[in-house]
Amino acid sequence: MSKDTAVRWGWLKFMYIYTIVGAGGLGLGIIAVPELMKSVFTLPNGDPITFGITGSVYLSFGLLSILGLRSPLKYAPILFLQLGYKVVWFAGVVLPLLLAGKFPMYALPIAIIYATYVIGDLIAIPFSYIFAKQSDA
């Protein structure tokens, strides 16, 4: 890592912990007790396969973030991927629904939580490190 790479170590570790607790906990809940999670978050009934895939992805982010606590820079792409899919969700799903006046109110808490991840990831991710040319040594 070069000297000019700025790393916000506290933010980076915080985002791993936030992902372990938030995404990991939600994913575990979706896998273990899906009906309870639908009730708690007032989610409509949907395809159990799609809901299960969502839970699996969230749980995977949480589990991989445990590794990020041990090697924060090495696992920064985990947070980068998390940032990416959330930004795509806002741009490709939320924005069109808002513009059409069809954004469901049950999704508001999800959007707020996702926004906290986007903001936290933007602060925490060491973009100069991720985009730096790496030597193959």
Image (cartoon, rainbow, N blue to C red):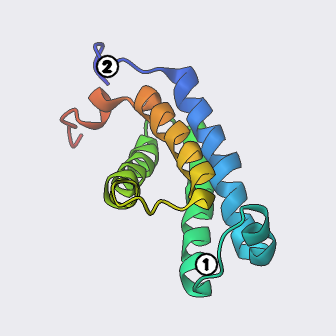
Left or right: 129 as drawn, with respect to 60: left
Please, what is the three-letter code of the amino acid marked with disc 2?
Thr
* Quarter of the image that includes the N terminus: top left
- Judged by depth in the image, the label closer to the viewer, 2 or 1, is 1
Please, what is the three-letter code of the amino acid marked with disc 1?
Gly
Pointer 1 local density, CA inside 10 Å: few below 14, some 14–19, many at least 20? some
> Is 73 located above or below residue 94 in the figure?
above
> Is 20 located above or below residue 132 in the figure?
below
Upstream in sequence: badge 2 or badge 1: 2
Q: Nearer the viewer, residue 49 or 15?
A: 49
* Quarter of the image that includes the C terminus: top left
Q: Would you name the residue on which mark 2 appears? A: 5
Q: Secondary structure at mark 1?
A: helix
Q: Nearer the viewer, residue 90 or 63?
A: 90
Who's the residue at 32% across and 52% down the image? 91
Who's the residue at 53% across and 80% down the image? 50
Q: Nearer the viewer, residue 113 or 126?
A: 113
Left or right: 28 as drawn, with respect to 36: left
| Residue 16 at x, y percent in the picture | 59, 40
Left or right: 75 as drawn, with respect to 36: left
Q: Quadrant of residue 36?
A: bottom right
- Does residue 67 show up? no
Pointer 2 local density, CA inside 10 Å: few below 14, some 14–19, many at least 20? few
Q: CA distance from mark 2 to mark 1?
A: 38 Å
Residue 52's disc number: 1
| Residue 38 at x, y percent in the picture | 72, 71
Left or right: 99 as drawn, with respect to 49: left
> Is 49 located above or below residue 84 in the figure?
below
